[in-house]
Image (cartoon, rainbow, N blue to C red):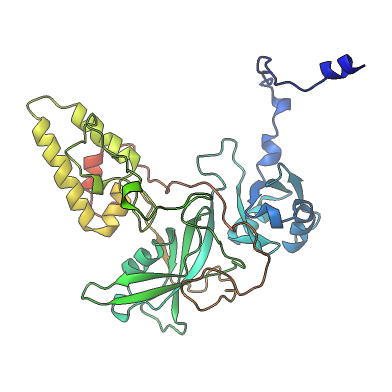
Amino acid sequence: MDKAMLALSLTEDDDAPFNLPDLPQYYATERNANSLIGRLLNPEHQNMANLILEMPRKWQKNNRVRGITLTRERFQFIFNHAHDLEEILEKGFHTFDDWGLAVERWVEHPPPGFLQSVQIWMQIKNIPVNHYTKEAISELGGLIGHVIEVAFDPDKPQRQDYVRVKILLDVSKPLKKSRILNLPGGGKTTILYFYEKVQRRSHQQDLPRNITPSTSSSHQVQVRPILSDTDPLFGVLNENQVGINSSTGRPKINSEVLQEMRNYLLASSNEDRLIREQRVISSVREAEKDPITRKTVLQLETPPSFTTDINKGKGIVFGYDTDSSSTQSTIKDHQGPKIMAEAIQPARKLDHNDLDAFSRLSLPYSSS
C-alpha cells in the first residue's frame, strides 16, 4: 500500500505542451467583447466573492452584468449591453472594501502594462499665482503621473482653490501628498495634491523589502551606465540625457527614439558619420529646451487634452492628515498591504511610425 501511495505522488509535468484547437467553438471572443477585466489592488483586504456579488448592485446594473473570478486577484464582468460597459468605464477610478481596483476593457491580446495603471482625477493646490497656465498645470500634474486631461478655464471665475487634472497613475507607486517646487525667479513653494475617490493611500517604501540602504560611501551601489562603449550613441549623448527621470519615474528618452538614433548613425558612412552625430546632439538639445517638445517628441507621451468643464467626472476627496510628510489616511484601518501593487506601465506612445527621430525632433508642437 505504501509503495502504491508513493507512486501517486505529484511530479512536475514533463509532457509536451498541449495544442489547444484553433476552432471557433474554443473562443469566447463575442461574449468577452462586452466585458471588463480587473484586479484587486489589495487582495489581502478585498474579498473577491463579495466583489462578484456586490459590484453589480453598486453599479446599479443588477441582472445586466455578471461577474467571474479568474484568479485570486483578477476578475471579469460581462455586460449584457455595450452602453452599460461604457458607462462603468467612464466613471473612472473604482473601489471596493475601501481599496482600489484596476479595471480595463477586455482585449484579446493584452498590451504591456495591462491592469498596471489607473485613471484618477486629482486636485492641485497652492499653485503660484503667476504660473496659472495650462502648460504649468500640466507639468505639475506630470510629477505624479501621465497627464490625460486638464480641467481649467482661464477666462472664467474660479471659486475653488485648486485645479483638477486627470492622470494615468502607475499602480506600483505611492500617492504623493506634495512636491517642493523651485520657482524660476528664486524661492520655493510646496504644491499639494488631493485625490478624488481614493479612500486609502499607499504605504509603499522607496526600496524593496529586506533591503536597507547603506550610509557608508564604500558600500554604495555602482550604477551601470546606460550607454556602453559599444553603443553607437556612446560619446554622442551623455549619461544624464538618458535613463530614468528621478522626478517623474519615466524614461528621459523613449527607447524607440533611442533605437532610431542608433539606426540613423549605423546607416552612415565614414565620411558623414561626424555630421550625423552632430545632428543627433543638436536635435536632442533643442528638444530638451521645451518641456512640451521633450515629452511629445523625446518621450513619445500623448499631449494632454483640456476641458473647460471644471467639474468633469468629479468625485469626493477623502480626508487625510495635514502632515505633508505622511501618506497615511486619517481613516483608521489595519496596516495592510499597499493600495497600489507591483508593475510599471510605460507611457502611452504617439504613432510616429512614418517619421524618423530627427523628422520628429524638428516638428513644431502644433504638428505634434
Instruction: Please tell me whether residue 151 is drawn above or below residue 49 in the rendered image.
Output: below
Q: Is residue 148 left or right of residue 65?
A: left
Q: Is residue 343 left or right of residue 36?
A: left
Residue 2 lies, with reference to residue 89, above or below; the image says above
> Taking the image as drawn, is residue 25 in sight?
yes
Q: Quadrant of residue 366?
A: bottom left
Residue pictured at 77% horizontal, 61% vertical: 57
Q: Give the percent coordinates (x, y) of residue 301.
A: 37, 51
Residue 83 percent across, percent down from the top left: 66, 54
> In the image, is 215 to the left or to the right of 240?
right
How many dots with numbers?
0
Q: Nearer the viewer, residue 18 or 24?
A: 18
Q: Is residue 366 visible?
A: no
Specify whether 2 is left or right of 321: right
Q: Residue at x 72, y 27 (%)?
A: 26
Q: Position of residue 14 (x, y in %)?
A: 67, 16
Q: Please, is residue 232 above or below residue 360 in the view?
A: above
In percent of width and height, residue 70 lies at 71, 41
The N terminus lies in quadrant: top right
Residue at the left extreme, as displayed: 271
Residue drawn at point x = 32 percent, y = 81 percent: 129
Quarter of the rendering containing residue 351: top left
Who is closer to the viewer here, 191 or 136? 191
Identify which residue, 46 or 204, lies in the foreground. Answer: 204
